[in-house]
Image: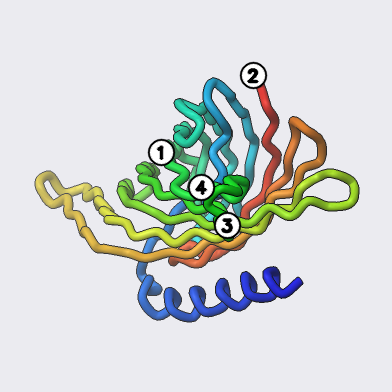
Amino acid sequence: MNSILKGVLLIAVLAFAVSPVEGSDAFGLTFGNLTTADACGFGIGYIGGFAGLADNGTTLFGTITYGFSDYTEGRAKIGFFDADYKGADPELVLGVNFKYEFMDYYDRNRKNPFDLAFGTFLEYVSVEWGSVLQLGGDAIGSIPYRLNSGRRLIPYARINVRLERASFDSPIPGADDSETDFRLGLNAGTKFELSESLSIYGEFQLDGNDGFFTGLEFRAF
């Protein structure tokens, strides 16, 4: 119980640290995080379906995750982003992630206190006024708790730093413009194993596109 309380306090401190830095003018990520620090394992694949309800709009998307080794995995994401302003049509959004599990909680030889992973990501979204491209790196921490039922409850948190480039279209030839800034973001959530092959996620995001993300993921192979 003490470790859970420490985790909650850590997330609260991170949220306080990130909130004045990420800036109200940040576009923010449209996919959220929706993964723990634990890598899925070599040759294992997962398929997920997720939704995000956030300040800048709603995202519906699917994911494919594949383990390239016991400690590395990649994830491809594709979906639609419906911007939260009148007359906006749903637009295509694409993303990729790569994650390396640096510390494994179940490695008893090292007695690691939690899972820790580092990764990179890229996200592209087309909107009515132009497009947003984001490239960055992140750190994810999570702790698995095994319940009496045998299922696991896994709280996690991610901090990311990214380069956010917004391109603005103009009806005037040659008048297009763009803006590039460094941004920070925080995600905190929980993964719950419904069965050996099916899990549900719930997550809050604070990065300029503040909101809630949820969905299901199942093992495909």
Residue shown at 74%/53% (left/top)? Answer: 153
The residue type indicated by label 3 comes to Phe
The earlier-in-sequence mark between 1 and 4 is: 4
Q: Name the side, left or right, on which 163 lies relative to 16.
A: left
Q: Nearer the viewer, residue 28 or 115?
A: 115
Q: Amino acid at mark 4?
A: Phe
Residue 114, numbered circle: 3
> Is residue 183 shown above or below 134?
below
How much space separates mark 3 and mark 1, taking CA atoms?
Answer: 20 Å
Dot 3: within a 10 Å radius of its alpha carbon, few (fewer than 14), some, or many (20 or more) residues?
A: some
Q: Are marks 3 and 2 in contact (CB under 8 Å)?
A: no
Label 4 SS: loop
- Percent position of residue 177, x then y: 17, 54
Type of amino acid at the residue the image marks with label 1 = Phe
4 vs 3, front mark: 3
Instruction: List the single residue furthest toward the right.
Output: 149
The alpha-carbon separation of the residues under discs 3 and 2 comes to: 26 Å
**Kind of residue indicated by mark 2:** Phe
Q: Secondary structure at mark 1?
A: strand
Disc 2 residue crowd, few under 14, some 14–19, many 20+, Cα 10 Å = few
Q: Which residue is mark 1?
A: 98
Q: Check disc 4 and report the residue beneath it.
A: 31
Q: Position of residue 61 (x, y in %)?
A: 57, 37
Numbered mark located on residue 221 in the image = 2
Secondary element under disc 3, as helix, strand or loop, is loop
